[in-house]
Image (cartoon, rainbow, N blue to C red):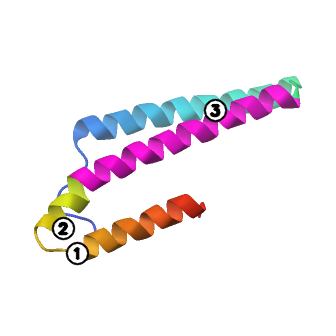
Amino acid sequence: MERCEVYLSEESVQELMRRLSRIEGQVKGIRRMLKEGRSCDEILIQMSAVKSAISSMAMFLLEEHFNSCVKPSVESGNVKALEDFMRAVRQLVKGG
């Protein structure tokens, strides 16, 4: 996939970094819970929270990417940008 001319705004990058830091903290919390011998139920709940946070971050990135890159590229005649975007969405949805 080609990189578009326009990239994410600084505010978007900062929001993604903030979310990623929170996810890192949650993962470290899970590691700590395992070391402490916490119940599987508690650990699974925290794992679910991490999964949800990653999904939310992905949706945010998809929307920002669409608005900052895909839409302007398509408007300037680059239809391949839309095809690339849809390929990325398919990969995200199928999980790999």
What residue does disc 3 label? Answer: 49
Magenta-highlighted residues:
40-67
Q: Position of residue 8 (x, y in %)?
A: 25, 48
Q: Is residue 42 left or right of residue 19?
A: right
User: Counting residues from the N terminus, which is met first, the one under dot 1 or under dot 3?
Assistant: 3
Provide the secondary structure element on which disc 3 rests: helix
Residue lying at the far left of the rendered structure: 76
Residues marked 2 and 1 touching at CB (< 8 Å): yes
Which element carries disc 1, helix, strand or loop?
Answer: loop
Q: Is residue 96 magenta?
A: no
| Inter-mark Cα distance, 1 to 3 | 36 Å
The residue singled out by tag 1 in the image is 79
Q: Main secondary structure of the magenta part?
A: helix
Q: CA distance from mark 2 to mark 3?
A: 35 Å
C-alpha distance separating marks 2 and 1: 5 Å
Whether residue 76 sits left or right of residue 2 in the image: it is left
Label 1: few (<14), some or many (≥20) within 10 Å?
Answer: few
94 shown above or below 40: below
Q: Quadrant of residue 95?
A: bottom right
Residue 1 in sight from this viewpoint: no
Q: Earlier in the sequence, mark 2 or mark 3?
A: 3
Q: Quadrant of the C terminus?
A: bottom right
Q: Amino acid at mark 2?
A: Val
- Mark 1 vs mark 3, foreground winner is 1
Q: Earlier in the sequence, mark 2 or mark 1?
A: 2
Which residue is pictured at 52% across the width and 65% down the height? 91
